[in-house]
Image: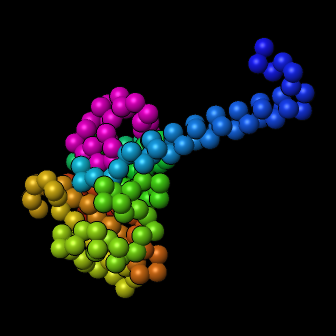
């Protein structure tokens, strides 16, 4: 036996150390899983704009729960809470397809490394001339929306990333999806 000749105290210490090592490796693995799920112009990791609710639910480790109202025939728009890697994001769904993903968790970062809490200046440095800045639609005196188009398509039918930010708080939300969809401040109207 491996513990033969060890005192009871030493065996306890060895077992506690082994448990701590296993716990550390498991928590590191889950953190690396989250870091592998980058926010990109088409979505968050494997969860992408244009997927049906059924396709998104079939992704391993992704759970969707409807939180918005039942969609009405005119708009077929509602919201889902999405759990992915033990974090929550929101998905706006129009006509049963994911139209926009809204991230407010600092655990996820964009491919360029931007996360919730980063400064407006950092977004400008990372995305350079690709960023257009406009006043926030409702909080025009308190914040801005930094828009990045692409790299896929154009303003009429392309994808983009929007960063809602203020000078005091930095980036507070990151929206990804169809460029026209992330330009809308409203949810389902």
Q: Between residues 47 and 52, which one lies in front from this camera angle?
A: 47
Q: Percent from the top left, x then y, of residue 176?
A: 28, 55
Which colour style is shown?
rainbow
**How many marks do you count on the picture?**
0
Of all residues, the one furthest to the front in this rendering is 5
Residue 45 at least partly seen: yes
Position of residue 32 relative to residue 152, above or below, is above
Q: Between residues 27 and 87, which one lies in front from this camera angle?
A: 27
Q: Quadrant of the N terminus?
A: top right
Check residue 64 for magenta coloring: yes
Position of residue 173 relative to residue 98, above or below, is below
Q: Residue, x 25% and y 38% (percent of image)?
A: 51
- Identify the magenta region: 43-65
Q: Percent from the top left, x then y, of residue 130?
A: 18, 69
Kindly indicate the quadrant of the structure image that contains residue 24: top right
Q: Residue, x 29% and y 74% (percent of image)?
A: 125
Q: Residue, x 54% and y 43% (percent of image)?
A: 28
Residue 189 at least partly seen: no
Kindly indicate the quadrant of the structure image that contains residue 62: top left
Q: Quadrant of the C terminus?
A: bottom left
Q: Percent from the top left, x then y, of residue 103?
A: 40, 56
Q: Between residues 110 and 88, which one lies in front from this camera angle?
A: 110
Check residue 102 for magenta coloring: no
Question: Is residue 5 shown left or right of residue 156?
Answer: right
Position of residue 189 relative to residue 144, above or below, is above
Question: Is residue 56 shown left or right of residue 95?
Answer: right
Of all residues, the one furthest to the right in this rendering is 8
Q: Percent from the top left, x then y, of residue 152?
A: 14, 53
Q: Residue, x 22% and y 42% (percent of image)?
A: 50
Of all residues, the one furthest to the top in this rendering is 1
Of all residues, the one furthest to the bottom in this rendering is 141
């Amino acid at each position: 036996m491996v513990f033969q000749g060890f005192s009871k105290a030493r065996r306890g210490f060895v077992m506690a150390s082994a448990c701590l090592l296993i716990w550390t490796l498991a928590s590191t693995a889950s953190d690396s899983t989250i870091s592998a799920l980058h926010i990109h112009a088409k979505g968050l990791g494997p969860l992408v704009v244009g997927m049906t609710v059924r396709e998104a639910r079939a992704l391993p480790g992704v759970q969707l729960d409807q939180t918005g109202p039942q969609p009405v025939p005119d708009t077929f728009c509602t919201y889902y809470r999405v759990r992915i890697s033990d974090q929550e994001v929101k998905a706006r769904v129009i006509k049963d397809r994911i139209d926009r993903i809204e991230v407010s968790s600092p655990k996820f970062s964009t491919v360029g490394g931007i996360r919730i809490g980063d400064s407006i200046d950092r977004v400008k440095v990372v995305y350079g001339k690709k960023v257009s800045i406009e006043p926030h639609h409702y909080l025009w005196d308190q914040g801005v929306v930094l828009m990045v188009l692409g790299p896929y398509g154009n303003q009429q039918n392309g994808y983009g990333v929007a960063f809602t930010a203020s000078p005091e708080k930095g980036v507070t939300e990151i929206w990804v999806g169809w460029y026209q969809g992330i330009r809308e401040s409203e949810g389902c109207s």
